[in-house]
Amino acid sequence: MFCLIDDDGNSVAAFDYYVKNLISAGYAYATIKRYSEVVAVFLDYLVEAGVFGVAVPIERLNAAVEGYLHLRVTADRIRATPDNAADSDLCFSNRSWPPSIYAR
């Protein structure tokens, strides 16, 4: 139904597995789409943080997840921060975020 494509043009197996389980559980199309979008954003963040698809120490993974939570809570402030702001830890230069999911 949906797939997430990585930077190399390959389908992300973990995402495919997640969507397959949502379908198997009988969720509505709109629910599957929304949940998939949220998970796609999270996985993209983990890739950008360098902790998805590679072996990393648990402390680094935990720090990335905690950082994501911080970003979600302060998202409005981040969006309002100019690219050249002094508070650079709250700025993203990746304007293609969030990632897109594609219907199969």
Image (cartoon, grey):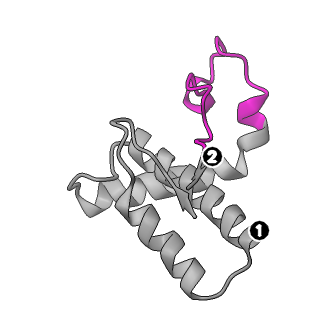
Would residue 88 be counted in the magenta stretch?
A: yes
Q: Which mark is residue 30?
A: 1
Residue 54 position in % (x across, y down): 23, 52
Q: Quadrant of the C terminus?
A: bottom right
* The quarter of the displayed image where residue 14 is located: bottom left
Q: Is residue 57 left or right of residue 32?
A: left
Whether residue 48 is situated above or below residue 80 in the rendered picture: below
Q: Residues within 10 Å of mark 1 (few under 14, many from 20)?
A: few
**Residue shown at the point (64%, 58%) measured from the top left:** 38
Q: Amino acid at mark 1?
A: Ala
Q: Which residues are magenta?
A: 77-100
Residue 6 position in % (x across, y down): 40, 43
Residue 36 position in % (x across, y down): 61, 62
Contact flag, marks 1 and 2 (Cβ < 8 Å)? no
**Residue shown at the point (35%, 57%) measured from the top left:** 61
- Dot 1 or dot 2: first in sequence order is 1
Q: Which mark is residue 101?
A: none
Would residue 49 be counted in the magenta stretch?
A: no
Residue positioned most to the top: 84
Q: CA distance from mark 1 to mark 2?
A: 25 Å
Looking at the picture, tell me which residue is in the foreground, 16 or 70: 16
**Residue shown at the point (39%, 55%) measured from the top left:** 12
Looking at the picture, tell me which residue is in the foreground, 88 or 28: 28
| Tag 2 residue | 71
Asked which secondary structure carries label 2, the reply is helix
